[in-house]
Image (spheres, grey):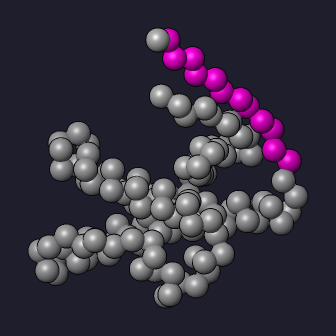
Amino acid sequence: MEVIKKAYKYRMYPNDEQKDMINQTIGSARFIYNKMLEDKIKYYNKYKKPLNNTPANYKDEYEWLNIVDSQALCQSHQDLMKAYDNFFNGKSNFPRFKKKVLETLIVPVLLIIILEWKIAKLDCQK
């Protein structure tokens, strides 16, 4: 059975409010990735045990994380866990902190990739 994959490209023209929300979501996803990585490193250096943290652990301390889409934060958590798995399996180096260089947001439900205000909606059936 042959699988056909389709991709759709969309141009997005967000208003100022939508731009702010997209930027907040991208920034929050980057923040949660970096914060969780930092806490894992500190915890391991202190106790020599791995830390099992999730984005939900940070929502009380950083209430502004409740404003953004939780799926974006969960995707950051999954990305960090994948980076750790790759490191421990010898596939890559130790995870690095994310920089504000290339702003990409992946929302798992629709798999929407936002890159320089261009959107590609991908058909993710395998």
x%, y% of residue 15?
A: 88, 58
Extreme-front residue of the structure:
1
Q: What residue sits 58% from the left and 85% below the top? A: 63
The range drawn in magenta is 2-13
Q: What residue sits 48% from the left and 62% below the top? A: 74
x%, y% of residue 69?
A: 62, 65
- The mark tally for this picture is 0
x%, y% of residue 24?
A: 66, 67
Extreme-bottom residue of the structure:
61
* Residue 27: in magenta span: no
Residue 28 quadrant: bottom right
Q: Is residue 121 left or right of residue 76?
A: right
Residue 111 quadrant: top right
Q: Nearer the viewer, residue 40 or 4?
A: 4
Q: What residue sits 17% from the left and 42% below the top? A: 90
Q: Is residue 2 above or below residue 96?
A: above
Q: Nearer the viewer, residue 35 or 110?
A: 110
Q: Is residue 1 above or below residue 71?
A: above
Q: Is residue 79 left or right of residue 27?
A: left
Extreme-top residue of the structure:
1
Q: Nearer the viewer, residue 63 or 98?
A: 63
x%, y% of residue 82?
A: 33, 50
Q: What residue sits 60% from the left and 77% below the top? A: 66
